[in-house]
Image: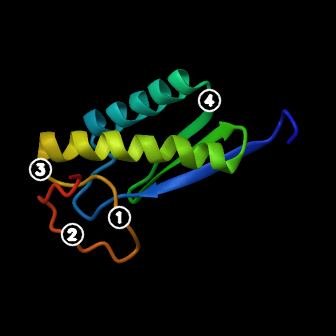
Amino acid sequence: MSPEASGSASLLTHQAADLHAPRIRETIIAAAHGIAERTGVEVEDVTCETDRLTIRVSGSTLMAIGLLAELRRSTDHWHVGRFGTHLWRAGPDDDRPTGTDDHG
């Protein structure tokens, strides 16, 4: 891998999520940067769209996926606790009820 390599990955939002709400968007971006700092990953860019969050890191796509896995875990748990709905889709056919906490 060359030092200039970048990797990116995306998370799709759950149907009830609103990434354009300033408080939610700011919290997610801050969490992404916090996780990256703790794990030594350099974030190049974070993009929030209506239906997804995309992150680009200095490093491999696998590094981006790893960062997003932790971001998904922590922010979905936060969002369910705070707003009663999931933030991220579990898969392309996610039909979980919006207010169900299934994190165990």
Give 81 or 16, whichever is nearer the viewer.
81
Find out whether the residues at labels 4 and 1 contact each other: C-beta distance under 8 Å.
no
Q: Is residue 23 left or right of residue 99?
A: right
Q: Quadrant of the N terminus?
A: top right
Judge whether residue 17 can be spotted in this image. Answer: yes
Tell me if mark 3 has few (under 14), some (14-19) or many (20+) residues whose alpha carbon lies within 10 angstroms of its own. some
Q: CA distance from mark 4 to mark 3?
A: 31 Å
Q: Earlier in the sequence, mark 1 or mark 2?
A: 1
Question: Residue 44: percent from the left, percent from the top?
Answer: 64, 33
In terms of secondary structure, where does tag 3 sit?
loop
The quarter holding residue 4 reads top right
| Residue annotated with mark 2 | 96
Instruction: Look at 33% across and 47% down and name the residue there.
Output: 19
Q: Earlier in the sequence, mark 1 or mark 3?
A: 3
Give 34 or 26, whichever is nearer the viewer.
34
Find out whether the residues at labels 1 and 2 contact each other: C-beta distance under 8 Å.
yes
In terms of secondary structure, where does tag 1 sit?
loop
Tell me if mark 4 has few (under 14), some (14-19) or many (20+) residues whose alpha carbon lies within 10 angstroms of its own. some
Q: CA distance from mark 4 to mark 2?
A: 32 Å
Judge whether residue 47 can be spotted in this image. Answer: no
| Nearer mark to the viewer, of 1 and 3 | 1
Amino acid residing under circle 1: Ala
Q: CA distance from mark 4 to mark 1?
A: 24 Å
Q: Earlier in the sequence, mark 4 or mark 2?
A: 4
| Residue annotated with mark 1 | 90
